[in-house]
Amino acid sequence: MIQQRKVSDMEVKKYTATPIGDGRYKLGESPFYDSEMKRFSWVDILDGKLYISYESGINKSDIKAESSDMGQHIGAAIPMQGKDGFIIAGYDGLYTFESGKKSLLKSMKDEFKYYQRCNDAKQDPKGRLYFGSSVDNSYDIKPHGNLYMFDEGNVTILERNTGISNGMAWNSACDKFYFSDSEFNAVFRYDYDISTGLITNREEFFSVTDKCPDGMCIDKNDNLWVAVWGGRRVECHDGSTGELIAVIEVDAQNVTSCCFYGANMDSLFITTAGDGLNGKYDGSLFVCTVDL
């Protein structure tokens, strides 16, 4: 494990996220901002819906969003590169969603156990899809699965025996890959080979000891911004040392993921989960501008 320098509270930058819109999501996740389309997207895993809102439709009082029902739990929806569509990490496999139509891209029924489903997903710098599996909450089974790569129709297992696969990110030099596993309460760092997409030399980069690291994004300085499930916050960790350098307070218990947006890519769009909770903003969307 990386030896992290202890940082006092005085050295940690503090921010407060602002709730936007009146929508409440059972398990909001997979936020993306498509700068070319000027479009936000996110999913509700439990409702199986993909939400799309153009930049002009995002403000503090209301959100104008289109929703599409995928007919099953979906772990993530990733904007397709060069196309007006999405790759859907569904319950039982990968799908494309274009022009309002969902089509099977790759079945995972032979890979998954009956109680597993796709969870978080991201595309690497070469457009290969990384995705993980988790356990359907309706089964009383300890979460376990694998981290996969989908490339040119083939699925490769990159890491076996993961817990709950969540946040993924690559540094700007394209030689490091970061992966948060909520079951292990840690973010792991790997060496990354951009030519093959393979990852090696896993090490625990930092831990979140009191709660669970969830979705994650990386900023232009290669610092990691990690949503903390159960922790009412997003943490920023130095991408070289792993030390905590900033915290965004979020007025919702289960913070699930985040992504950057805006002209300077210095604002965060944040998703949360409200299933089984009754806090005022549990399940809401949030935004926050930070200093980079």
Image (cartoon, rainbow, N blue to C red):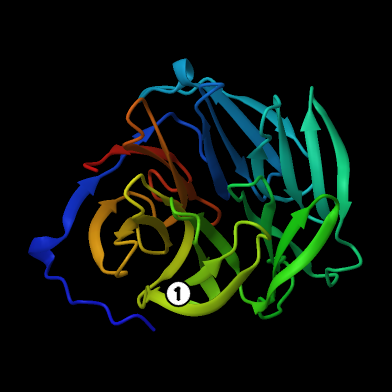
**Residue at horizontal 37%, vertical 22%?**
61
- Residue 109 drawn at (x, y percent): 89, 63
Quadrant of the frame with the C terminus: top left
Instruction: Looking at the picture, tell me which residue is in the foreground, 118 or 37.
Output: 37
| Furthest-left residue in this view | 10
Would you say 53 lies left or right of 3 here? right
* 161 lies above or below 63: below
**Residue at horizontal 56%, vertical 61%?**
166
Give the amino acid type for the residue marked by disc 1 in the picture: Ala
Provide the residue designation for mark 1: 186
Quadrant of the frame with the N terminus: bottom left
**Residue at horizontal 65%, vertical 66%?**
198
- Residue 119 drawn at (x, y percent): 66, 58
| Furthest-right residue in this view | 110
Instruction: Looking at the picture, tell me which residue is in the foreground, 172 or 136.
Output: 172
Q: Residues within 10 Å of mark 1 (few under 14, many from 20)?
A: many
Tell me, yes or no, if residue 150 can be seen here: yes
- Residue 96 drawn at (x, y percent): 80, 38
Circle 1 SS class: strand
Instruction: Looking at the picture, tell me which residue is in the foreground, 25 or 209.
Output: 209
